[in-house]
């Protein structure tokens, strides 16, 4: 029997050796889902460890500027500075229930790796993070933190040395280590039950946001924007409004150098995505005629991925979620605006949602309520953002710092 | 009366001859090149290899270990395309008197259209398909097309693993055809396998679960490994070890290696 489908997307395309592991994981997940104590414990952990509920901030200056009432959901205020905490703490509690002692994870930009490393430190698990060798080079600060937190970071030198190759390498670990190890997948992708399970943990965002917007404005939002890499933060906030057909849900993908250039990571917003199966699930992938995965591009490493959540692919197919893309340059401009107008430093990934919303403001009725999910904060990405902003003072500082290291 | 399906061409080939055990070898197409693949296959067949498994490279080879994964990647980097690979496979079927099996990942089939890929493979005379990321639950259509287009000539090859419970082994084994590929241990291709009582226990479980011949792969590297499998399985699969020898010593050495098995 086929399981884990959302329309024609999803499924569990796993090697036979993992069949039993997935069967047990699905069983544990379904038991947890039926058990009110599990969710109660989860909420308690998120409240006391991660600072939830996160605020819904009225963006006063942007609202005045655009003539629409703009609210920002502050996932940047989570432990480790992104929505990733919601997923890893949930999976961590599940790992405890399953009695496993070791966790592994893939990471692209390093956010999910850092989040997993904090969870492992807190819960007492051994932790190994697979990270593409190129990403290790680009995201040294996150590598530093993962190591300080006690995790082993393994640079992956196969394939394109990026996120998709880190996923493959984590799978290779798991097919050998499943007896005592859980693979903490970082987004709402992969084989069943991961897309559904990760979305469940992230639904905490949407549940809070719905309550908060009703309390603050007395009405539902006109639109909700979220950036889409794998799709977990988008799934998180969208679920709060799924049953409100009057609320338009908009996913913003990485437009990179522009959709026409082919150098992007827009699986749903461009015409380049084709149905395929990889990494354990069926969705739209950026692939060539032969079915080989293509290289993707984005200023935001966390959105730079060939596939996308099968649940989002389905929601696009049935017309419930609309997808657009924001190009690198628009994202950098939106980041500056967000900082200057509201004092908020968004992660480059999250700022795609902001850029997408800004681009469409004129289509939104004046005075209407808009929610933007700010999935993570950017100050921790100072190296990447300083490069994206081409800041000369920062460059000077690094050159000077390097000179000091050389001479010491 | 029980309805016992007549054995496929692949199964008949395996059951023919007096060898105590048969050898299945493996190549990654286009690595280092199709010309070099041809040389190596000539040597393998001359050395008495009984079945050859040809892997069509994929950019995301999750079930393969570092050596074969790198071979996939290198082949693609050198410009391998599936059309050239399929033409090479068609020529190989004509050129060699032994069965040729295709191993690849499901997305390669999907990109060509799964049905037309299988129809084409059947038409060429390919004897088996191994697709490790298309589990039984998802393989219904593919198995149907293998039967429909192959008519006993093209087998959908199922996998047994040490983590597969008996009930599932029985489910997988009941309608298996051609051979069942037994994965010797947890982990990916190319790592060390212990030829110990636990492995033999697993092979006994496999034997009880199916009537078709068993092939054991993952970590078979030497004459000793092969000898220890005599009487336990019909086929020993040698993959990574041959790639390593080819890399280090060239095509002739691969021939000698297989002759020595």
Image (cartoon, coloured by chain):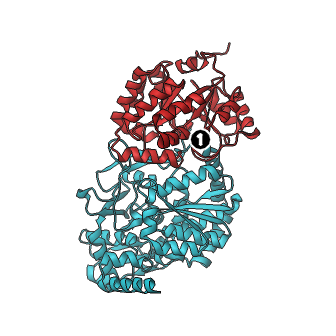
Chain colours: A cyan, B red
> A83 or B13, which lies in front?
B13
Query: Is residue A330 shown to the viewer in this render?
Result: yes
**Pointer 1: what residue?**
A16
Q: Residue furthest right?
A: B197
> B153 or A319, which lies in front?
B153
Identity of the residue drawn at 54% across and 31% down: B256
> B205 or A329, which lies in front?
B205
Tell me if B179 is positioned left or right of A351 in this view.
right
Question: x, y percentage for residue B10?
Answer: 54, 21
Instruction: Give the class, few, some or many, for how many residues have Cα within 10 Å of label 1's Cα (few <14, many ≥20).
Output: many
The quarter holding residue B87 reads top left
Q: Chain of mark 1?
A: A
Question: x, y percentage for residue B3?
Answer: 63, 15
Q: Is residue A297 above or below residue B125?
A: below
**Mark 1 falls on what kind of element?**
helix
Q: Residue furthest top?
A: B1
Question: x, y percentage for residue B219?
Answer: 61, 41
Q: Is residue B96 above or below residue A355?
A: above
Identity of the residue drawn at 62% across and 78% down: A48
Q: Is residue A274 above or below residue A48?
A: above
Query: Is residue A217 shown to the viewer in this render?
Result: no
Q: Is residue A176 above or below residue A69?
A: above
The quarter holding residue B56 reads top left
Figure quadrant of the N terminus of chain A: top right
The quarter holding residue B193 reads top right
Identity of the residue drawn at 46% across and 76% down: A76
Identity of the residue drawn at 29% across and 59% down: A263
Tell me if B9 is positioned left or right of B81 in this view.
right
Tell me if A128 is positioned left or right of A318 in this view.
right
Question: x, y percentage for residue A110?
Answer: 48, 68
> B97 or A13, which lies in front?
B97
Q: How many numbered badges does the structure rendering display?
A: 1
């Amino acid at each position: 029997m086929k399981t884990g489908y959302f329309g024609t997307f999803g499924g569990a395309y796993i090697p036979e050796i993992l069949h039993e592991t997935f069967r047990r994981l699905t069983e544990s997940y379904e038991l947890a889902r039926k058990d009110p104590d599990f969710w109660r414990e989860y909420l308690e952990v998120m409240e006391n460890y991660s600072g939830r509920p996160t605020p819904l901030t009225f963006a006063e200056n942007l609202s005045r500027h655009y003539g629409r009432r703009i609210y920002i959901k502050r996932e940047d205020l989570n432990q480790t500075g992104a929505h990733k905490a919601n997923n890893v703490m949930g999976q961590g509690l599940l790992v405890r229930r399953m009695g496993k002692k070791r966790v592994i994870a893939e990471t692209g930009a390093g956010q999910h790796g850092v989040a997993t490393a904090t969870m492992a430190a807190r819960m007492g698990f051994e932790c190994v993070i697979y990270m593409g060798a190129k990403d290790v080079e680009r995201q040294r600060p996150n590598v530093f933190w993962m190591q300080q937190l006690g995790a082993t970071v393994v640079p992956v030198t196969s394939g394109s040395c990026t996120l998709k190759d880190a996923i493959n390498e984590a799978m290779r670990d798991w097919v050998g280590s499943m007896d005592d190890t859980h693979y903490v997948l970082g987004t709402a992708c992969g084989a069943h039950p991961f897309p559904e399970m990760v979305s469940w943990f992230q639904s905490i965002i949407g549940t809070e946001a719905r309550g908060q917007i009703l309390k603050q404005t007395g009405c539902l939002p006109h639109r909700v924007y979220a950036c889409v890499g794998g799709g977990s933060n988008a799934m998180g906030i969208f679920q709060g409004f799924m049953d409100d057909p009057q609320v338009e849900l908009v996913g913003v993908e990485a437009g990179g150098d522009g959709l026409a250039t082919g150098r992007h990571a827009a699986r749903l917003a461009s015409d380049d995505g084709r149905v395929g199966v990889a990494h354990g699930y069926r969705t739209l992938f950026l692939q060539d005629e032969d079915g080989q995965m293509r290289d993707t591009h984005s200023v935001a490493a966390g959105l730079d991925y060939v596939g996308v959540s099968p649940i989002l692919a389905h929601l696009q197919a049935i017309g419930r979620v609309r997808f657009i893309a924001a190009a690198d340059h628009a994202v950098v401009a939106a980041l500056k605006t967000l900082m200057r107008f509201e004092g908020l430093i968004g992660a480059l990934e999250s700022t795609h949602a902001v850029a997408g919303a800004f681009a469409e403001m004129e289509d939104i009725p004046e005075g209407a309520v808009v929610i933007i999910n700010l999935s993570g904060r950017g100050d921790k990405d100072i190296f990447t953002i300083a490069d994206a902003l081409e800041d000369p003072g920062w460059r000077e500082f690094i050159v000077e710092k390097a000179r000091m290291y050389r001479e010491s | 009366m029980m309805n016992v399906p007549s054995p496929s061409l692949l199964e008949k080939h395996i059951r023919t001859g007096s060898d105590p055990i048969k050898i299945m070898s493996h190549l990654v197409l286009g690595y280092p090149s199709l010309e070099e693949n041809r040389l190596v296959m000539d040597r393998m067949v001359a050395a008495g290899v009984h079945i050859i498994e040809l892997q069509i490279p994929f950019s995301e080879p999750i079930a393969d270990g570092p050596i074969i994964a790198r071979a996939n990647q290198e082949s693609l980097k050198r410009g391998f395309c599936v059309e050239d690979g399929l033409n090479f496979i068609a020529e190989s079927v004509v050129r060699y008197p032994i069965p040729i099996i295709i191993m690849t990942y499901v997305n390669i089939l999907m990109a060509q259209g799964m049905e037309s890929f299988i129809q084409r493979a059947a038409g060429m005379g390919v004897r088996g398909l191994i697709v490790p990321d298309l589990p039984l639950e998802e393989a219904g259509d593919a198995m149907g097309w293998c039967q429909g287009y192959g008519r006993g000539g093209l087998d959908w090859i199922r996998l047994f693993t040490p983590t597969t419970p008996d009930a599932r082994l029985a489910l997988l084994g009941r309608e298996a055809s051609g051979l069942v590929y037994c994965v010797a241990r947890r982990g990916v291709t190319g790592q060390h396998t212990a030829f110990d009582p636990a492995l033999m226990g697993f092979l006994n479980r496999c034997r009880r679960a199916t009537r078709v011949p068993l092939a054991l792969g993952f970590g078979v590297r030497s004459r000793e490994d092969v000898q220890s499998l005599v009487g336990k399985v019909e086929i020993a699969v040698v993959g990574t070890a041959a790639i390593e020898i080819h890399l280090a010593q060239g095509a002739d050495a691969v021939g000698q290696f297989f002759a020595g098995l």
